[in-house]
Amino acid sequence: MPQVLTIDGPGGSGKGTIAQKVADYLGWHFLDSGALYRLTGLAAQNHNVALDDKAQLAVLAENLDIRFELVANDEPRVLLESKDVSLEIRLPEAGQAASKVAAFTEVRDALLLRQREFKRAPGLVADGRDMGTVVFPDAPLKVYLTASVEERAQRRYKQLLAKGQSVKIGDLLQDIQARDDRDMNRAVAPLRPADDAIIIDSSFMSIDEVFQQILDLLKDRDMIAAK
Ligand code: C5P
């Protein structure tokens, strides 16, 4: 059976970076589930579907024509209907649209099987909000990665700046707070740690420290060989 490590947490907690790094290091598959919600939001915009039209959104989610292309030492390239949207889906507007469409059960159900198909040998690192609670409830290691809202806004700021996007830190802070609020308080699959999740607060930790802690947890649980 393929191993599964889930990493859930709020936006900007570093889970995307860490999940990708662990997957690269172990040669496991990587699921960026947030990208699926971002792509659904973008597809809605492209096809003039309103962000509250849950039935049509579910049809879009079910039929998303997407591809993740691996790029050495970088984030995968993301294609929607053959168009490169790697940058577009990372913008704050795409995050807001994602969290709106993600609040609908119909959309979440439409994306469920697609997410579970990422579970393939030798293993999967799944990054999201409900990986440990809903999509892979049997995962032997669940991590909930968080950080203070100020630290998360700073990280997003640096990430977007590195991609050549100019944004205001105050706007990012508001964006993160609005998304946290919507994600944590929605009726379906709200953002929360699974009962058996290990909570890591990365506010004062480097990427390498978090990475090492997760490797140690995987070794403790015999999910990878201790070196
Ligand atoms: O992780 P990312 O910031 O890309 O996620 C964008 C949005 O997609 C989140 O704010 C959340 O509303 C939604 N999402 C979700 N469930 C997941 C992953 C993301 O609801 N597993």
Image (cartoon, grey):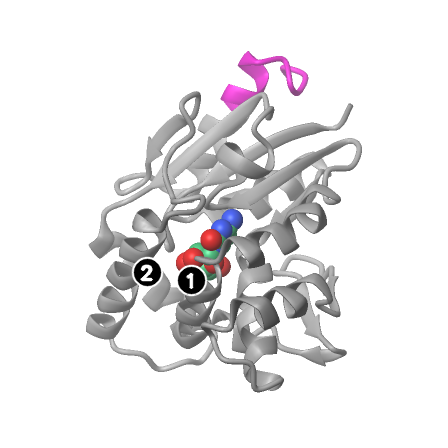
Residue 107 percent coordinates (x, y)? 57, 59
Q: Secondary structure at mark 2?
A: helix
Residue 218 percent coordinates (x, y)? 57, 21
Q: How many marks?
A: 2
Establish if 211 lies above or below 104.
above
On residue 159, the disc is none
Task: Judge: label 1 CB < 8 Å from ligand 1.
Answer: yes
Q: Secondary structure at mark 1?
A: helix
Task: Judge: label 2 CB < 8 Å from ligand 1.
Answer: yes
**Residue 130 or 76: which is nearer the viewer?**
130
Are circles 1 and 2 on residues that touch, CB within 8 Å? yes
Residue holding disc 2: 179
Q: Quadrant of residue 215?
A: top right
**Residue 176 or 206: which is nearer the viewer?**
176
Q: Quadrant of residue 206?
A: top left
Q: Quadrant of the C terminus?
A: top right
Residue holding disc 1: 99
Q: Which residues are magenta?
A: 216-227
Can residue 17 be seen from the camera position used here?
Answer: no
**Residue 194 or 176: which is nearer the viewer?**
194
Residue 224 within the magenta-colored segment of the rendering: yes
Residue 37 percent coordinates (x, y)? 54, 62
